[in-house]
Image (cartoon, helix red, strand yellow):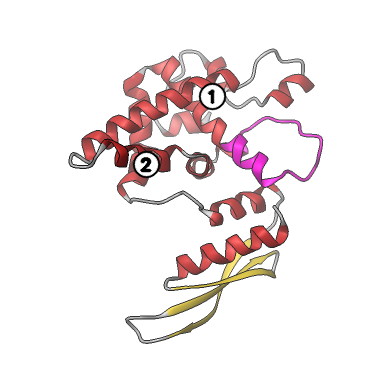
């Protein structure tokens, strides 16, 4: 697997990594007796432990409650689906769904699960330090950039577009105000058609609002 080569992982048990990408629907269809669910179950705990340790050492002066909130941001479903997408894991999943059009909730959930199942495969095959090293290259930089994933509507609409082979683009429709106090209006285009627009004090904020409106309008 290229993903393993990229991060310097030489598998001791290749079947673990194969299992990490098999959705139960694919297993049923092809008479395979295993899927990623058990790996995902354990991967959740391993991820939480390593992220907790990293946050504890990085933020020495914040409370337990604030650490819990921070951890939740980086292990929530949106965050996990984002990690999975950035690594290209969503293109490696083996699944057999009845409907050709996959719902955004299904895509998000499966993508998030697969990141955890791969993490657990690395943990079982390579041990805790190699798992931590993998996260240091994939998740820790995201924490260092203080990226917020709660209500990340742009990621959700992008997953929807990728799943259904639709282009998703943002277009600046308007900007006004003094140079130090600008307001932006952004439109979101799916296959060239505007499906939502938002206004905010930054382009990113306006894009999030536009994506939120698109999700509501398209009922996805």
Q: Residue at x 53, y 20 (%)?
A: 39
- Residue 25 in which image quadrant: top right
- Residue 20 in which image quadrant: top right
Between residue 209 and residue 16, name the one nearer to us: 209
Residue 163 in the image: x percent, y percent? 68, 47
Residue 102 in the image: x percent, y percent? 73, 43
Q: Earlier in the sequence, mark 1 or mark 2?
A: 1
Residue 37 in the image: x percent, y percent? 60, 22
> Which type of secondary structure does the marked residue at label 1 adopt?
helix
Between residue 218 and residue 23, name the one nearer to us: 218
- Mark 1 or 2: in front is 2
Q: Residue at x 22, y 34 (%)?
A: 57
Near mark 1 (Cα within 10 A), the count class, few <14, some 14-19 or many ≥20, is many
* Alpha-carbon span between mark 1 and mark 2: 22 Å
Q: Is residue 44 above or below residue 181?
A: above
Residue 163 part of the magenta-drawn span: no
Residue 40 image label: 1
Position of residue 74 in the picture relative to residue 206 (left or right): left
- Residue 140 in which image quadrant: top left
Near mark 2 (Cα within 10 A), the count class, few <14, some 14-19 or many ≥20, is few
Residue, disc 2: 69
Q: Is residue 163 above or below residue 34?
A: below
């Amino acid at each position: 697997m290229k993903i393993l080569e990229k991060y310097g992982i030489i598998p001791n048990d290749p079947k673990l990594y194969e299992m990490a990408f098999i959705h139960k629907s694919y297993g049923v269809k092809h008479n395979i007796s295993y899927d990623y669910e058990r790996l995902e179950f354990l991967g959740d705990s391993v991820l939480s432990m390593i992220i907790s340790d990293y946050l504890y050492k990085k933020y020495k002066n914040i409370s337990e409650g604030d650490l819990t909130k921070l951890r939740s941001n980086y292990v929530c479903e949106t965050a996990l689906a984002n990690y999975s997408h950035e690594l290209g894991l969503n293109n490696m999943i083996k699944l057999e769904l009845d409907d050709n059009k996959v719902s955004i909730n299904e895509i998000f959930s499966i993508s998030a699960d697969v990141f955890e199942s791969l993490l657990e495969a690395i943990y079982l095959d390579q041990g805790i330090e190699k798992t931590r090293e993998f996260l240091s290259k994939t998740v820790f930089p995201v924490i260092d950039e203080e990226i917020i994933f709660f209500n990340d509507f742009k990621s959700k609409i992008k997953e929807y577009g990728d799943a259904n082979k639709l282009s998703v683009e943002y277009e600046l429709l308007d900007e006004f105000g003094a140079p130090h106090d600008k307001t932006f209006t952004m439109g979101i285009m799916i296959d060239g058609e505007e499906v939502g627009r938002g206004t905010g004090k930054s382009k990113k904020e306006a894009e999030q609002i536009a994506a939120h409106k698109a999700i509501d309008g398209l009922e996805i």
